[in-house]
Amino acid sequence: MKKIISLTVNGVSHEVAVEPRRTLLELIREDLGLTGTKKGCGIGDCGTCTVLLDGVATFSCLTLAIQADGCTVETVESLAENGQLNRLQQAFVDQGAIQCGYCTPGMLMTTTELLRRNPHPEESEIRRAISGNLCRCTGYQKIVEAIQTATEDSDE
Ligand code: FES
Ligand code: FES
């Protein structure tokens, strides 16, 4: 039987009827049409489905939609500011940290959480933070450099 849940996604309030086993990932992509969040493995191994749930980086494929009842969700669509890529997104573009791009939404959300907690992380902290986000294209070096660049820019 469906249950009505209330949640705020990217600043917009929603009431949605969901089956008990529906995942937050399915809710975001299929009910709300926010397809920036990607499904990779679906079992908590790749991190490409990462969103922020009450500010905490969370695998939306492992989270039931009903667990988000009353919560605030941020997806990759929330990052752009006034239609412009934010500092972190632009750094990924400028540093060549995006190849196929499939991992990018999850990487950006994981990194967003990191930079809120620590605006100037050491390289080792960056690598630890993104260790749950798999990338099959870049070899990670460009991603780390992009995050470092965004950090340097924040000194301005
Ligand atoms: S799709 Fe969620 S961790 Fe891979
Ligand atoms: S850019 Fe292709 S998986 Fe990361």
Image (cartoon, grey):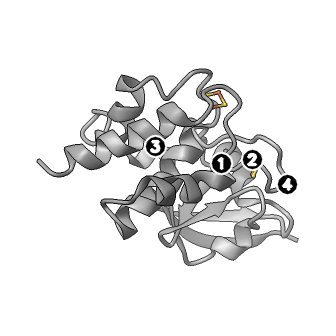
Residue position marked by numbered label 1 in the rendering: 133
Determine which residue is flagged by label 2: 46
Q: Do callouts 4 and 1 mark residues in contact (Cβ within 8 Å)? A: no
Residue plotted at (45% across, 23% down): 96
Mark 1, residues whose alpha carbon is within 10 Å: few (<14), some, or many (≥20)? many
Q: Residue at label 4? A: 43
For label 2, being within 8 Å of ligand 1 is answered yes
Disc 2 element:
loop
Residue pointed to by mark 3: 77
The mark that comes first in sequence, 3 or 1, is 3
Mark 1 lies on a secondary structure that is loop
State the separation of the CA atoms marked 2 and 3.
Answer: 20 Å
Mark 4: C-beta under 8 Å from nearest atom of ligand 1: yes
User: What residue is drawn where x is 27% and y is 42%?
Assistant: 81
The foreground one among 5 and 39 is 39
Disc 2/disc 1 C-alpha distance (Å): 5 Å
Task: Name the amino acid type tagged 3.
Answer: Glu
Specify the amino acid type for callout 2. Answer: Cys
Give the image quadrant in which the ligand numbered 2 is located: top right
> Mark 4: which amino acid?
Ile
Q: Quadrant of residue 19?
A: bottom right
Query: Quadrant of the rendered structure where residue 117 is?
Result: bottom left
Determine crowd level at label 4: few under 14, some 14-19, many 20+ residues with C-alpha closer than 10 A.
Answer: few
Front tag of 3 and 1? 1
Q: Earlier in the sequence, mark 3 or mark 4?
A: 4
x, y percent for residue 91: 35, 34
